[in-house]
Every structure is written in structure tokens, then in C-alpha cells.
Image (cartoon, helix red, strand yellow):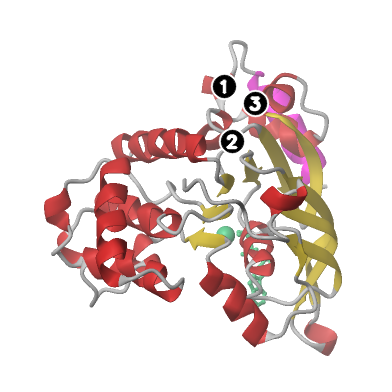
Amino acid sequence: MTGAPPPAGSAAATGAPVLAVDGLDVHYGRRRRRRPALKGVTLSVARGETVGVIGETGSGKSTLARAVLGLVRASAGSITVGGEEVTGHGAGKWRALRRRGVVQYVFQDPLRSLDPDLTIADSLVEPLILAGVARAEALTRARAFLDRVRLAGDLLDRLPGELSGGQRQRVAVARALVTEPELVILDEPVSALDSANRVQVLEILKDLRATGVAIVMISHDLGSVAGIADRVAVLYRGELVEVGTAREVIDTPRHPYTRLLVSSAPTLHTAPADRAERDALRALLHA
Ligand SMILES: Nc1ncnc2c1ncn2[C@@H]1O[C@H](COP(=O)(O)OP(=O)(O)O)[C@@H](O)[C@H]1O
Ligand SMILES: [Mg+2]
């Protein structure tokens, strides 16, 4: 991090949360096909905080990420990013906000986060140049960031297709963080990785928290976020049904869906719920 004072209006300057989502509704489709994907979601992320957002497929996790990035419209509620109300922004203002690099995004599939025709060096330099950094300085920073994600500097001249899946995802993480954003949203960043790479990427994210970046990590797997998240938020059918510290959510889950998640992840606790309890919870949820 640089020693420069934070820009006026940034979360650091105002002490405001990096991200504040309040009463957010998002719908897909028009008229008779209109369906809610998020219903009254309220969640705030403090500066430097890591929040895990968990939920099953279709619960609205990616929609929440897309709404925060201005890629889908809110039909009600508000979103504040870095202290700035962004809900009413048009496409141009969203682009400008993304270009400033306040908030960055990592997809589940690293091939979507990286341009297959750009070398790793160019992939890392591009967001810095967009943010106004000179090329030589950008290259120096890119090289330093590769080290942070435990990749060797000789990868800089390669193309994404020449890297393993785990290496590519680490490059995608480096690309998102190289501009020193206030907030990074990672959408299922380890779901496509094998267990060795998964552990490595989770450890890197843990280390990167020390830079002061706030992290929103989306996962369908409570086990993947429990070790790194300060707080865990549980999405169920478009609604945020539970928010608490990872310990609270694991030890005293309140919503039946959270209880099911916890009991389905036996590594999280010493006394896994028995099968009968899991079946009862499933029956309750799908009633
Ligand atoms: N582009 C879209 N058009 C219509 N429906 C969508 C679209 N994207 C997602 N949905 C629907 O919105 C709901 C939430 O999806 P999503 O946010 O992708 O969930 P998750 O990331 O938790 O799997 C699902 O019911 C999904 O089918
Ligand atoms: Mg998703």
C-alpha cells in the first residue's frame, strides 16, 4: 500500500463501509417472465474485512456480485461502493468506477478473467495503465504482485493457455489486486480447482488480507470460506437468511438452511449431525 492519503470520498477517508448494500432487490426477465433473484438483501462490508457469501446454486450469489459491479440493475434498494452511492449510475459512470479500480472482480473460471491473447505481463499491466500508471512502473508492480501470489517472474511472457488452472487463478487474483482496490469480489474462486490448488489460493487470499483490501468471497461451500472469512452471510433463494462470524454460523446456525450447510460439511465441527437430522432439514427446506 502507498502512504498517500486516501482520496476524498473514499471509504478510508470517511470511515464508511467499503460496501453497503441496503434492501436490494434484483429481478430477471420482463413482464410475465419477471422473477426475483434477490429480495431485500442488506449487507455491509467494513474496510479490510473479509466476508464469505455462501448459498446453493441459484441462491443469487453471482447476482449480488453483478449488482455491486453494475452489471445488473437493482429494482429497489441501494448500493454504496467506497462511500459513493452507485445504484442510479448509468453505464458510463459504472465504467469509470471500475476503471478507477476501487472494486475488482475475479470469476470462478479464470479463463473468463483473463484474455487468452494477452501475456500474463499484459494482463497484469492493463488495469494499472487504465488507472493511469505509467508502463514501466506498472511492470514493476506486476512483477512484485506475481511474487505475492507465489508465481515465478518467468511466467510474465506466457499466455494464459500455457498455465495450469491453479496458476491461472492466481494470475486472476493478482490482476484483481494489483491496482490495490478497496474491495475485491471473488465469485467461487476455488470451485474449479483441485484440492491442492484450492488450499494454495485460499492461503494466498488469507495473506492478501494484510494489505487492507476488503474481500467478498462467494462460495457454495461453507468449508472454503470458514477459514478466511471474518463474517459469513448465507443466501437462500435470494434472501440473506443469516449473517454472523464464521464461528457463530458454524456453532449456532439459526436458519434451517444454514443448519443443513453446517451438517453437510463434517470437517467444520467435531460432532456431525446424523443422517436423520440432515434428511429432516432437507424435507423442511424443500417443503
Ligand atoms: N441472466 C439471467 N437471466 C435470467 N435469470 C437469471 C440470469 N442469471 C441468473 N438468473 C436466475 O437468478 C437466480 C440466481 O442466479 P445466480 O445469481 O446465478 O445464483 P448463484 O450464483 O447463487 O448460483 C437463479 O434462479 C438463476 O436461474
Ligand atoms: Mg454463481
Residue type indicated by callout 2: Leu
Q: Of marks 2 and 3, which one's residue comes earlier in the chain?
A: 2
Q: CB at mark 2 closer than 8 A to ligand 1?
A: no
Q: Foreground residue, 19 or 251?
A: 19
Give how far across and how far down residue 217 sits, in percent.
56, 47
C-alpha separation, residue under disc 2 versus residue under disc 3: 10 Å
The answer to whether the residue labelled 1 contacts the one labelled 2, judged by CB atoms less than 8 Å apart, is: yes
Q: Of marks 1 and 2, which one's residue comes earlier in the chain?
A: 2
Q: Which residue is mark 2?
A: 222
Residue type indicated by callout 1: Leu
Give how far across and how far down residue 25 sits, in percent.
83, 67
Give above or below for 211 relative to 280.
Answer: below
C-alpha separation, residue under disc 1 versus residue under disc 2: 9 Å
The reply to whether residue 246 is in sight is: yes
C-alpha separation, residue under disc 1 versus residue under disc 3: 9 Å
Other residues around mark 1 within 10 Å, as few (<14) / some (14–19) / many (≥20): some
**How many labels were placed on the picture?**
3
The answer to whether the residue labelled 1 contacts the one labelled 3, judged by CB atoms less than 8 Å apart, is: no
Classified by dominant secondary structure, the portion drawn in magenta counts as helix
Answer whether residue 221 is magenta in the image. no
Q: Which residue is mark 1?
A: 268
Span highlighted in magenta in the image: 273-286
Q: Which residue is mark 3?
A: 263
Furthest residue toward front = 4
Quadrant of residue 121 in the image?
A: bottom left
Q: Foreground residue, 66 or 136?
A: 136
Q: Of marks 1 and 3, which one's residue comes earlier in the chain?
A: 3
35 left or right, relative to 204: right
Q: Foreground residue, 78 or 12?
A: 12
